[in-house]
């Protein structure tokens, strides 16, 4: 809840009988053992505040929540109205179209008792009901246009059920006098699957190819709107048979057919996104490799485990890669490409991984090679251009921290260093449904803390997936009436690499009937990506001011910057020791923003 003690504005006694409003920050997420309000919870919401104060840079986002509690009577046909945000001194306005409203839907976790309901799904706002004894959160996301003048802006969120008085939430937005970059400096490398066995994407969106292609583009734009700027596994760019095909000439030479693929590549390039162009990628066994690479199974499935030592297969991989590189070079798109060669290779496959990395270097020297090597990465030194270890590694230091001296040396040599999230539970941060939202933001503080250049996540649309070692949520059904949102979403994910169910793993987006439906987690991840930019700005502006002629005022400002940066490093000490109190993290973000604003003013003088 917000720290203010102001009580809800009421319109007479009737309002108190019907419903209460309360506000919460963008990191409030409470699991509930049942959907109904307890008397204690009802009393807490009745006494909560109806004023919210947030701050953001130009071209930035920030979020908050409004809770509509109906302890005594059902609320019907509840409408939400957003007003413009107005600067009282200048009269300038932020138009309501920059304020997005979402009705939050909860998801019930499964597989561990007691089951709980966790708010996550952000359904686009439309009028709604609140049953008696229930609570309905509203997620409010605000984008500050890049041309907005700095200052304080005030507005309202108005709530009115049918037959009940209107209540309002007073909103104060402080716009800081600096802007975030249009494109983030961080590589945000996320998976987006369109393959049936992983997402059932085309089953959720049946219809002619043109309609399905339009839906894929809608998802790509949605990811980019959330500052996701790279595609990790290449489902769309190398592996989806509806998008990518392989052709063979009279001499048996293989190449890609880019006819259907080019419109997607053109969109990715226009949005400034990077993408994987290597296929397979390799995985631990041939069965798993072909499960993820259906384009290759018909031609090479007969090789079985010999695939890892097959000149025939190596030749095909080289031919396909050469055709991709030549095509991108002709289009002027090659700088967007990278090659993700192996997915989490075991130590006994490092020899083969080195061979494949050598192949990439030989046939595509301009294209960086991405390796995920969580143990003894020095065995691959000289074979990788982008290093991407797991953020966690069981008890003790994470994979990056365990080999930090090695990775620091590779950074100095000019390599990129990213890291990724998988199935490691607390004390490492993770983006599971039943984990606090602060996890979604602190990952990017930790990324800044270690000077890393990218964050990877395995998937955003793993809706319905099963392998011999993984049982995932049962979310696709042939009858639309039996499918979400007509039945509850199943977030369960039981994987042999985790010690507990990974609830909601790989499900940052939900398959809405008209396109992507976001989540509180994905919105918080975007906020975290912007936190990373705040921290970079604070460092850069401090360094620029330090080069100016020294004055007492400038030295005082620089000392203040060092204190704020030191506090940020303490908040993100390491991957299993970080600030878990959302209120404290947001307060520190406020200090960071105010300090950047002060530095910005000093640099103008």
Image (cartoon, grey):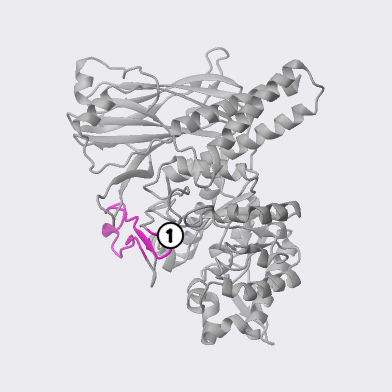
The residue at the far front in this view is 396
Q: Residue at x 47, y 59 (%)?
A: 211
Q: Which residues are magenta?
A: 471-499
Q: Residues within 10 Å of mark 1 (few under 14, many from 20)?
A: many
Location of residue 82 in the rendering, given as x and y in whole percent from the top left corner: 41, 27
Q: Residue at x 51, y 79 (%)?
A: 286
Task: Report the label total.
Answer: 1
* Res. 120 in view: yes
Q: Residue at x 36, y 22 (%)?
A: 50
Locate residue 299: give its quadrant. Answer: bottom right
Q: Answer whether residue 582 is magenta in the image.
A: no
Q: Is residue 451 left or right of residue 467?
A: right
- Of the pair 280 and 39, the residue shown nearer to us: 39
Location of residue 124 in the rendering, given as x and y in whole percent from the top left corner: 39, 41
- Of the pair 526 and 343, the residue shown nearer to us: 343
When the figure is inspected, residue 413 is found, relative to residue 305, above or below; the finding is: above
- Residue to which mark 1 is pinned: 462
Q: Answer whether residue 494 is magenta in the image.
A: yes
The residue at the far right in this view is 549
- Of the pair 308 and 450, the residue shown nearer to us: 450
Taken as a whole, is the magenta stretch helix, strand or loop? loop
Name the secondary structure under disc 1. Answer: loop
């Amino acid at each position: 809840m917000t720290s203010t003690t102001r009580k809800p504005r009421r319109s007479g006694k009737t309002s108190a009988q019907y419903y209460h409003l309360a506000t919460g920050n963008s990191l409030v997420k409470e699991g509930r053992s049942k959907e109904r309000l307890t008397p204690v919870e009802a009393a807490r919401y009745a006494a909560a505040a109806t004023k919210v104060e947030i701050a953001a840079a130009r071209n930035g986002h920030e979020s908050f929540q409004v809770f509509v509690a109906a302890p005594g009577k059902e609320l019907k046909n509840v409408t939400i109205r957003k007003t413009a945000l107005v600067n009282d001194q200048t009269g300038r306005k932020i138009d309501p179209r920059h304020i997005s409203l979402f009705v939050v839907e909860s998801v019930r976790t499964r597989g561990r008792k007691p089951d709980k309901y966790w708010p996550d799904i952000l359904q686009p706002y439309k009028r709604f009901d609140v049953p008696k004894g229930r609570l309905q959160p509203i997620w409010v996301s605000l984008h500050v246009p890049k041309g907005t003048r700095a200052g304080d802006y005030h507005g309202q969120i108005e709530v009115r059920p049918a037959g009940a008085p209107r209540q309002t939430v007073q909103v104060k937005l402080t716009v800081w006098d600096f802007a975030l970059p249009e494109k983030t400096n961080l590589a945000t490398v996320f998976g987006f699957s369109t393959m049936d066995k992983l997402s059932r994407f085309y089953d959720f969106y049946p219809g002619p190819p043109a309609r399905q292609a339009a839906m894929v583009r809608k998802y790509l734009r949605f990811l980019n709107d959330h500052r996701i700027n790279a595609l990790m596994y290449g489902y769309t760019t190398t592996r989806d048979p509806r998008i990518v095909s392989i052709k063979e000439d009279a001499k048996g030479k293989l190449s890609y057919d880019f006819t259907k693929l080019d419109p997607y590549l053109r969109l990715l390039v226009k949005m400034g996104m990077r993408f994987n162009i290597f296929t397979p990628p390799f995985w631990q066994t041939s069965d798993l490799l072909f499960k993820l690479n259906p384009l290759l199974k018909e031609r090479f499935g007969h090789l079985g485990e010999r695939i890892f030592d097959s000149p025939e297969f190596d030749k095909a991989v080289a031919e396909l890669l050469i055709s991709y590189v030549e095509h991108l070079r002709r289009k002027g798109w090659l700088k967007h490409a990278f090659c993700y060669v192996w997915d989490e290779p075991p130590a006994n496959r490092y020899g083969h991984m080195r061979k494949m990395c050598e192949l990439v270097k030989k046939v595509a020297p301009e294209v960086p090679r991405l390796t995920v090597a969580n143990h003894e990465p020095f065995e691959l030194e000289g074979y990788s251009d982008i290093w991407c270890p797991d953020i966690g590694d069981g008890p003790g230091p994470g994979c990056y921290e365990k080999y930090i001296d090695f990775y620091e040396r590779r950074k100095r040599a000019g390599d990129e260093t990213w890291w990724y999230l998988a199935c490691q539970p607390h004390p490492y941060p993770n983006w599971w449904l039943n984990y606090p939202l602060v996890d979604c933001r602190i990952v990017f503080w930790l990324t800044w803390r270690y000077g890393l250049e990218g964050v990877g996540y395995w998937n955003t649309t793993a809706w319905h997936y099963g392998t011999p070692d993984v049982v995932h949520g049962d979310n696709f059904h042939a009858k639309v009436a039996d499918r979400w949102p007509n039945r509850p979403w199943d977030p369960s994910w039981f994987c042999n690499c985790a010690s507990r169910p990974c609830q909601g793993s790989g499900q940052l987006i939900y398959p809405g009937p008209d396109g992507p439906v976001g989540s509180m987690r994905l919105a918080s991840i975007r906020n975290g990506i912007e936190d990373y930019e705040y921290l970079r700005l604070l460092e850069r502006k401090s360094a620029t001011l330090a080069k100016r002629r020294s004055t007492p005022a400038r030295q005082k400002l620089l000392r203040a910057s060092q204190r704020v940066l030191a506090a940020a490093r303490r908040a993100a000490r390491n991957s299993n020791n970080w600030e878990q109190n959302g209120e404290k993290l947001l307060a520190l973000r406020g200090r960071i923003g105010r300090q950047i604003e002060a530095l910005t003013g000093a640099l103008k003088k």
